[in-house]
Every structure is written in C-alpha cells, then in structure tokens.
Image (tube, coloured by chain):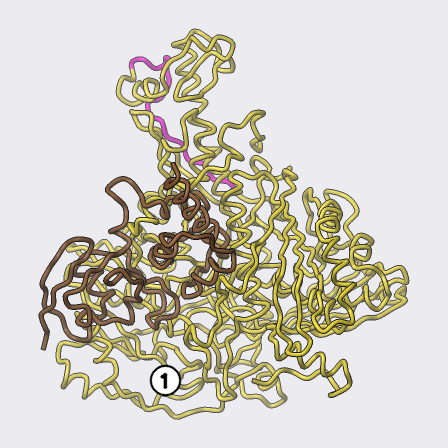
Chain colours: A brown, B yellow
Amino acid sequence: MAIEITLTVNSVTRTLSVEPRRLLADVLRHEFGCYGVHFGCSHGACGCCTVHVDGQPRLSCLAFAAQCDGMTIVTIEGIAKGDELHPLQKAFIEEHGLQCGYCTPGFIMAMLPFVERGGEPTEADIREAMSGNICRCTGYHGIVAAVRRAIADRKSAANA
Amino acid sequence: MLERLPEQPRYIGARITRLEDPRLVRGQGRYIDDLVMPGMLHLRLLRSEFAHARIAGIDASMLQERFPAAQIFTGADIGELAIRAAADLPSVQKFAQPILAQQRVRFVGEPVAAILLDDAYAVEDAAELVLVDYDPLPVVADVETALAPGAVPLFEGWRNNLFIEQTRKGGDLDAARAAAAHVIRRTYRNQRQAGVPMEGRGVIAMLDPTGRILTVWSSTQIPHLLRTYLAEELPWPENQIHVIAPEVGGGFGVKGHIFAEEVLVAWLAIRTRRPVKWIEDRREHLIASIHARDHVHTLEAYVAADGKVLGLKADITVDVGAYSVWPFTAGSDPGMVAKVLPGPYDIQGYEATFRGVATNKCPIGTYRGVGRPSAVFSQELLMDEIAAELRIDPFTLRERNLIPSFPYKNVLGFTYDEGSYAESLVRMRELLAPDIAAARASRDKPVRIGVGFALFLEQTAHGTPDFIKRRSPIETGYESAKVEMHPDGRVTVDTGLQCHGQGHETTLAQLAAEQLGVPPEDVVVRHGNTMTSPYSVGTWGSRGITLGGGAAYRAAGMLRDKLLSIAAQHLQATPDAIELADRHARIKSDPQRHIPIAKLARWAQRNVENLPAGMEPGLHAVAFVDGPADGAYTNALHAAVVEIDTKTGAIKLKRFVVVEDCGTIVNPLVVDGQVRGGVVQGIGSALWEHFIYSEDGQPLTTSFADYLMPSAPGLPNIEVYHIETPSSVTPLGMKGLGEGGAIGPAAAIANAVSNALGVPVRETPITPYRIWKLLQQKNGNEGGEGREGR
C-alpha cells in the first residue's frame, strides 16, 4: 500500500515509495538523513520540526510525506553555503540564541523568512513571529537578539 | 590547596561564543532518536490507564494473531527488576518500583507491558491490540485523602502514606517564641509542574556479538550512575557496560534520574540479543516522566517589634506521587525545603517538620532548583507579609534580618561563604526606583503596577559530607576530569559531567586553555561517555563549573607544571621564569626566548630522550575535586514589575531584573544564558505551567495545548546584573549558577502582584482568574481564602 512520491530536499531530487501515513518529518530524517529535523511534541505545538515546503515554513510533524509529492523542501541542513553559515545561524551563535540546540533548527527555519522580509520590526513583532516555537533553555532573550542582529546585518550588507 | 585566579587571566572571564554551537545551528547534533542500529527493535510501552488498579489479566492473543513477529513482556517476565530508591533512615518507608507493573498500578502512565517490533509505526499499532483487564481500586488523588484518618496505605506493609516524615531543628525556638512581639502564621502553595526538556527521554541498548559488552545510549544527565545502577540491578559486570549520553536536548533535572525504561531496555537487549530502542513521546513525557513541586507549607514566624525574625517554625508537605525516585528519593523536595528555609536571614530558632506523601500520581523528582523555588516562595512571601503587618518597607525589613558577617554559621549549622546580600539590595533599590514610584502612583487606578522581589541564596557545589547527611543513594559529590595534550599540542579534556546545553565544551576549554597557554579552540571537551570519562555523578545541583571545571583546571595545572619543567631544561631557566602563552613556552622577562608547546608535547610522547633525566613520558593528568562540606553559596535578588488590569485580572510582566553573584565568572555569555533561561522557567512556574489531575487521578494536561509552556510573546527581556564575590572555599572562587534563575521568579512575581493588588497572593500559578478572585475578596464580594477551581 506504499505509494510513490518525488521530493526535492535541499536540492536533491529523489523518487521513493512511502506508506501514506508516514510523516514528512520521518521521511526527511530517515530517507534523506536530515536528522536536524527534530520531533519536540508531534502535535504541532512546539515548532521543533519546522522546514520549508515550497518556500513556506511548515510543521513536518503534521504533514504526511505523501502530501508533499512534487514539492521542494529545505531543512536546516540546506541553508548554509558550504562552510559559510547563513547570517541567521551566525547570529544565533553570536547572541547565544541556543543552549541544548534541540529547538534551534526549528527556530531558524521558522524565523528565516521573517529575517529576509527585513523592515524594522519591533521587539513585540519579533516575539510574536516566534510564538509558534518553544525553547526551554534560553528564555528567548538570545533568540530575539539573534533575529534582531540578523535583520541589522542584512541591512548593513545591502547598504555596503 | 585551592587554585587562585591568575592575575591577568586570558580566557577566564572572557565572553567567548560557544564552541559547540556551529554543529547545533547546522542541525548536526546527534540526539538519541537520530541513532539507528542494525537489526534494531522498537519498544512501545503499554501504560496504565488507571491511577490505581489491580491487573486482573493481560490478553495478547490479538497481538499474536495480527503481528506474529511481535514480542511482549510483562511484570511476570521481569523478575525482581526495580527502581530501589530509599534513604537509609528510620523515618523512611520503602517500596521498590517494578520496571513493569507487578499486578498493581499506582499512577496513570505506569509501564505495564513492553511490546517489541522492528518498525516504529507498526509497534504502536501492535501495542493497541493488547488488552489489559484492570480492577480499579480507590484512588488517592491528593494529600488530604492520603493522610485522612483510616486511609489505606498504597503499599503493602506500610503504616500510612508517608514516604518520609522527619523534623529538623536548630537554635532555641522556645526562646524566640517567648520573646516575640508578633506571631505571623501563613500557608503557601505551589502547583505541580515539570522540567519538560524539548527532547524527551530515550534509550537504546545493544549487546555486542560476543554477548559480553552491553552498550547503552541514553538521554541522561548521569551516565556513570546509570552504568553503576545497571551493573547492580541486572546484574552485569560494570567493566562490560558502556553508557553513552549522545547530544542531549535539555534536562533540567528531569534526566538526572534512573528510570524504569532504562533498566527495561537494557534487559530487553540482553534477553532478545537485538538492539532495542525506546523513544518517549510528548504525552508519555508529560504524564509519566518526572513531575516537580506540588508543595504546601505552613510557616509561623516569631517576630520582634522592630521586624527582626527571631524564630521560624515550618510544616512542609509535598505530594511526591506514586514512587520514590533514584538517586534523590521521595525525600528530596521536602527535605530541601526544611534545609534551606532559614535562607539569607539571621534566624536563631528554627524547627521544620517535612513529609513526602504518597499519592496515585506521577512521581516527583528533581527540577531546576529542587525544593528551593517553593522554599523561597514561602520565605519571601512571608517576609513581605511581615513587612506589611509591621508597616516596614520590604527592603528595610530584609536588611534588618540579613546575616551579619562572613563566614556565617546558620541555625542548622551550615557555614555560608562570602556573598553580596546587602550590596544586591542597595543595587536593586536603585534599579527599581522608577517602578516603585510608578506603582505608588497607580494605586487607585484600574490598571495597577506592582513591584516585588525575592532575596535568596543557593547552596551549590555540595561536597560529599552534604550527601552523607541525607543518607540517599546519591552518596557522593565529587567531580572529575582527565586532561591530555597530544603530540601536536592539541588538548582533550574528558569530563565526568554530561553537557545538555550548559556550554561545558566551551567553559572547560577556557579553563584548560588558561593553564596550558593554548587558545580554547585547541581544546576538545568530551563528555557523557563512560568509556572516555573518569567516574563522576553527572550534571545536576549547580556543580558543573565549580567542581567539573575545577577538576579540569586542576588537571591542566598538572600538565602545565610538566610542560614548564621540560621547557625549563631547554630554555635553561627555572620553571617559574617561564610562561605558557600563544602556544609557546617563553621566558617572561625575555619573550624572544621561546619554544613551541607542540614541540614540548611531542618530546613528552614521541622523542622522550629530550625529557629531563628521570621524567616519566606522557602528558596526561586526572583530577578529582570534591565540593566544600557545606557547599558554596550563590546569592541573588530577583525583582518583578507587573501590570494588572483590575477589571479582568490580566497580568503583564513589564520587567524582570536579576542581581546575582556566582563568584568568579568563567564566561559571562554562558552565565547570562543560564540565568535568563532559568528565570523564564520560573516565570512559567509563577504564571502558567500546571499539571492538573482529576479527582480520580486522571492527568488532564497531556499536551502542549493544555500544559502551558512560556513562549516569547508573553515575556520581557530579562535584565541581568552581576556582582562577583569569589568564594574562598572553591577552585578559582567559582560558585554554581545553573539552577538559581529558576528559584526566585515565583516569589518575586507573587510579591509584585500582592503589591499591585494590596492583597496577598499565596498560591501559584497566578492566573488571571486567581487575581480577579483575590480582587473580588478584597472588595468584599466573597469571603474566605478559597482555592481556585477550574
């Protein structure tokens, strides 16, 4: 009863046969080796499993892989350019936006479009934008600072 | 001899970004669920649906029909395997928790049967086909029921439902009572909650092909203790067990226990000769991992006319749930409160009776702060209530009661090292001045400002004598490190600590680098693996940097001495004329005369003919550091500024300010992160997080939709200020700080709400409903001190 689907994950396209009930997160982890996709709650409340599906942040614990047939997926493993980290990844390090690192991939994937949108978000805007993600270690302080820094860095890079 | 801070440290005190971060921001950390073994079986646990029941039968016929390959194990198969966690004290009643229920279940979520299959999805289907026939028994859902006259004990052979009941006293309470101008008696409550790391627990066990070596991967804070427990319980020779904690996604004390699942998975791997994997799901974690708090304290203070607290009497009850946990036991939370209630105050008469009560709920274990968040809640709310009753300013009342000098021996005989209690009060008064003024100005307005604070100390880095007194299975308090310099001059630190977010890979590297004259990037810190680390009791109890870091610094110091001796011969100088810096050994007064450290390291291991006559080859050292007998006392003052809408009870946290003193700081980035993270957990305790049970012991908060974790929008930035008072009783003057952030917030926020409302809060969580109800009571709409319904 497995069905055939084609996924493009971090620029690699593969056709594979999956059970219809298999979660996107499981397929990304075990078929594509993207173990940076983490299960935090498996009920769509913590954001740890956030990936981009056709450019949009999506909870891969609430999506079936079969629903994503033909779609393009980017995970945390796909955003650095070789050795060069994405500016948001760098900002997480600079601002101590992580401790145990378990929620971090989900936060980065959830906040990446927000950072790339730019503008001048307020503190409250930044906090609201991450309301779908839970971090138990940092108290969010470093994550908020990382997002703010990444937006500022992007702006100064554009002006340079 | 304790190490003193170097005059001009290069790396100690530096704000260095973490060496572990690059792999974590790339999603390259490998946590327990990311590990896959060939031929692995997946374990699904069938858990009790009843809070209290007798198991009349287990029917696996449907399972065997549909999934002939599935294997099932129940209490009948496991023999005597159990979690045996009791302090060796006459006041303690003992009962070992079977790793799978034996005929009787005592809380919803208790493991009843283990089902194995080679697919993680299919095993969940399979487990649903097993039918358990339960005969429900009367449920003891709360402390009142458990302690009611005639209550039937939950365990065979027990006198009553008390795991432990004991009294602790010091000084002259009768004299204090006789001299008191005021007696102030209050009752305070904290709800049941938990640590809730974002990664749940998980275990994999595998026997090697010879059948000798058992390797266990577990998301644990205590790998060596797990190895010892398995060796004794299975039993299995300890030199044939390897325990590895891979990347661990948070712990907060929850993973500082030995769990039934860890013993079970190891036993199943031996029994089936296949690798066995168990990954906890979020529901399992919330109902059946480890809960925390659930305290009721009644305090009676004997107070002089000037506000000086002469004596304190306390009655402490904790609903510790269905079983005692290893190694801290059911006595941990209540005992901790009884021990720490005198706090930073000079109280000369003290008596506390504490008890851990058995109920049909998830067992209570350690969670960041362990008893202290509740102790400080009661202590600091009481101080504010005394201040209010005597019409004394809360800052002044605390100043009047502070311990007068250092070292200070408290009423229970604990000696406090140097702290900055008075300075922190002065500093905070300045920081909060505008908010205090705003609070006064808002008194008659519909939206009111309140300011509250909590002053506390935290005993950290406890030494072995402290654990001997408790008589609990933890037994010891030392930490260990092995430091090795390789022939290329690079360094490995093997620590007995297990790192799950604390930044040890960076801070221990800083400490070793300081001694060895190499940059921290040249140091790799390995942890969480019993094959590489010397024995240790793991990461908990705010002891990592002080004891584990202290051990790394001490061991690196031994290597440093050896490097200096080798360099001395080559540079024709005495060792004390030489410094190690920038990867070189050089003459301090003539830096042009130098030799690369890598060369010395190579000589020590490859070209040993270059060593001074008689020197042993090799460049490694091991150090063990035990904590001071009474620990090192970190102090902090937390303050909250709240805004309350009196029409709805809505509460907004406007500011949260911390003034803390953890002695010498190794890395301020990490310290600030630990403080802020802890504070937000404490804010969760104060306002949102609550495990609720129905009257028949059913957990009602079983997902993140019901159990409210703090999220970013409801929180302010946490302001952190440091005072550094080095300790005289620890290496480098360091004190622990991992837990402190979580200790003060509930008290500070409750005092702020009381300040805003003009009516005392005495219970958490402080929900809008509770605030609204307090206002109704104050306005005379309803009498009495009611407890919140749902």
Q: Is residue B142 left or right of residue B617?
A: right
Above or below A78: residue B89 = below
Q: Amino acid at mark 1?
A: Gln
| Chain for disc number 1 | B
Above or below A88: residue B36 = below
Q: Is residue B260 left or right of residue B546?
A: left
- The quarter of the picture where the C terminus of chain A appears is top left
Q: Is residue B248 visible?
A: no
Q: Position of residue A136 (x, y in %)?
A: 46, 60
Q: Secondary structure at mark 1?
A: loop
* Residue sticking out furthest to the front: A159
Using the image as rendered, state which of residue B462 and residue B594 is in the foreground: B594
Using the image as rendered, state which of residue A119 and residue B73 is in the foreground: A119
Residue at (16% x, 54% y) in the render: B210
Q: Position of residue B275 (x, y in %)?
A: 20, 62
Q: Is residue B531 left or right of residue B331?
A: left
Q: Is residue B473 left or right of residue B354?
A: left
Q: Is residue A75 magenta?
A: no
Q: Which residues are magenta?
A: B609-625
Above or below B671: residue B43 = below
Q: Position of residue A71 (x, y in %)?
A: 18, 64
Above or below B60: residue B177 = above
Q: Is residue B216 visible?
A: yes
Using the image as rendered, state which of residue B32 and residue A33 is in the foreground: A33
Disc tally is: 1
Residue at (56% x, 82% y) in the render: B142
Q: Is residue B612 magenta?
A: yes
The part of the image, by quadrant, that contains residue B308 is bottom right
The part of the image, by quadrant, that contains residue B646 is bottom right
Q: Which residue is mark 1?
A: B103
**How many neighbours does mark 1 have within 10 angstroms: few (below 14), some (14-19), or many (20 or more)?**
some
Q: Position of residue B512 (x, y in %)?
A: 44, 32
